[in-house]
Amino acid sequence: MGISERGKEIKRRRHRRKKLALLSKRLEKATVSETASIADKIRKLTPGGEVIIAKWDLEKR
């Protein structure tokens, strides 16, 4: 029996949350070029990426 659509959605959310936690941890020591690449990864990771980037003040860096 396959996983329900709701289960898939929850799994995707949990993965995004883990990934964002890792990226925010890397962001503390990141250089300017690494910050830009992290911002790109956030944009690709989630549809609400622009909101997260604004919240973390990445567009100013």
Image (cartoon, grey):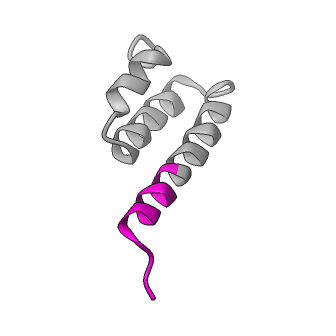
User: At x 45% / y 16%, what residue is drawn?
Assistant: 55
Above or below for 23 versus 16:
above
| Magenta span | 1-13
Give the camera-side residue of 57 and 1.
1
Majority secondary structure of magenta residues: helix
User: At x 61% / y 47%, what residue is drawn?
Assistant: 18
Quadrant of the snapshot with the N terminus:
bottom left
Q: Position of residue 28 (x, y in %)?
A: 67, 24
Q: Is residue 35 left or right of residue 49?
A: right
Q: Is residue 10 left or right of residue 27?
A: left
Above or below for 40 versus 50:
below
Q: Position of residue 32 (x, y in %)?
A: 51, 23
User: At x 42% / y 32%, what residue is drawn?
Assistant: 39
Task: Say how many tags the image has.
Answer: 0
User: At x 43% / y 30%, what residue is drawn?
Assistant: 36
Above or below for 18 versus 56:
below
Q: Quadrant of residue 40?
A: top left
